[in-house]
Amino acid sequence: MIGIQGLIKRFGDTTVLDGIDLEIADGERIVVIGPSGTGKSTLLRCLNFLDRPEAGRIRIGKLELDAATASNADILALRRRTAFVFQNYSLFANRTARQNITEALIVVQKRSRADALARAEEILRQTGLADKADAYPAALSGGQQQRVGIGRAMALEAELMLFDEPTSALDPEWVGEVLDLMRRVAERRQTMLIVTHEMQFAREIADRVLFMDEGRIVEQGPPGQLFNDPQDPRTKAFLRRVG
Amino acid sequence: MQGLDLQYMLGLVPVLLGYVPLTLGMATAGMVLALILGSLLAVERVIRVPVLDPLVVLFISFFRGTPLLVQLFLFYYGLPQVVSFLTQINGVTAAIMGLTLHFSAYMAESIRAAIVGVDRSQWEAARSIGMTQAQMMRRIVLPQAARVAAPTLVNYFIDMIKSTSLAFTLGVTEMMGATQKEAAGSFLYFEAFLVVAVLYWIIVEALSQVQKVLEKRLNRAFAR
């Protein structure tokens, strides 16, 4: 179980997250939608302290921390229970596709080299990148880079996978392959929190959809309910705009 | 103008070549130590450790702001007068110390700039997989900063090789010191210093070739 209570994030005078409460069941796949600048990405970034929240409690499995008092050790422990997929892929530029996957396994999880390499082979096969194992990110297409990015996150076997608009930076021709891979991850009942503008994808794979506006969760429910029968006027207005 | 004494010059070459190992040895030792110290100073400047930071700023300011020759004299002739255990220090050690401290200050600034230039995404990705600050620096940030800083750092190494000639003022008989002695014996100052100048030049040119290979290697990951 994952629990978030009263999460608050401010940038200067602007309150970006205005008290987020959220419970996520094991294996639940949640998609977060909403207008730009309403704190969707910030919510994800606060859950592994890429942005440090000002207040709130985060609980993942046995780990529980208070944002206001979290120590460096708490933050590391939190990050080691989560995996993050970035909008701009953020692959390690000085590492090959394979090394991007093994890096955390060897350095952070202290697995043996042989074990990490075996795991990387498995991930590369699953992401369809076996033939690109020794390529550096600069030599990969956007779609391939993002598949490595997802592979790197999959390899961690984290309790929660966070996807921050994983297809937004991609040329349209690569979006399909990345969504396909995310579908396969979802099929394993990996707990996922996904910020995306791909509404069709959200309908297909989400157990629950959250609509956020102005730093709050305005409305949430199963995709069928939220997309077909939204209650809040802001949700209705947003869904009309994005079609 | 009289003709050059070519025979003397040719005869001098093998004599001076005997001192190349000492010159390169001092420069290499100075370079390795300056790289380590410079990287530490640079990382400190980036993460700004409280209390330590102003001291690092002062260190860099002093060693960049005063001539190397003054620093060498300060270490070799000055410090032993106030710090007793330094009375045993020999000229080579003092020269390496001086070169290290002097060049680490310069390198710290280049490395700092290169670290700051590493894309945010690299830092965030390293944090997101749960790396400690040290792991992130050592495995992700510094290697990428090295690529940017490499040409400047090689320049400092070149400068350092030439600066080892100042060690002769501390009584070290390295290439420059040996030339000075030879010239004093033969009175053929022009010939002697011309030979040593060409030797320094050849060493630096050889290093420039190494630089090309090094840069190619560091850029390997970034080729499309």
Image (spheres, coloured by chain):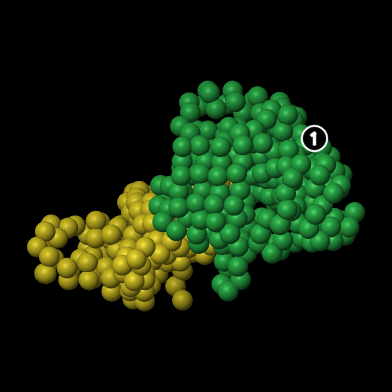
As drawn, the chain in yellow is: B
Most distant residue in the left direction = B84
Q: Position of residue A103 (x, y in %)?
A: 54, 37
Q: Residue at x 40, y 47 (%)?
A: A73
Q: Nearer the viewer, residue B146 or B50?
A: B50
Q: Which residue bears the numbered disc 1?
A: A180
**Where's the N terminus of chain A, which quadrant?**
top right
Query: Helix or strand or loop: what does disc 1 sit on?
Result: helix
* Visual hue assigned to chain A: green
Q: Quick check: can you spot residue B31?
A: no
Amino acid type of the residue tagged 1 in the rendering: Asp
Q: Residue at x 50, y 37 (%)?
A: A61
Q: Quadrant of residue B54?
A: bottom left
What chain does mark 1 sit on? A
Q: Residue at x 41, y 56 (%)?
A: A69
Q: Nearer the viewer, residue A115 or A43?
A: A43
Q: Nearer the viewer, residue A8 or B114?
A: A8
Q: Is residue B6 above or below residue B143?
A: below
Q: Quadrant of residue B79?
A: bottom left
**Where's the C terminus of chain A, which quadrant?**
bottom right
Q: Quick check: can you spot residue A228?
A: yes
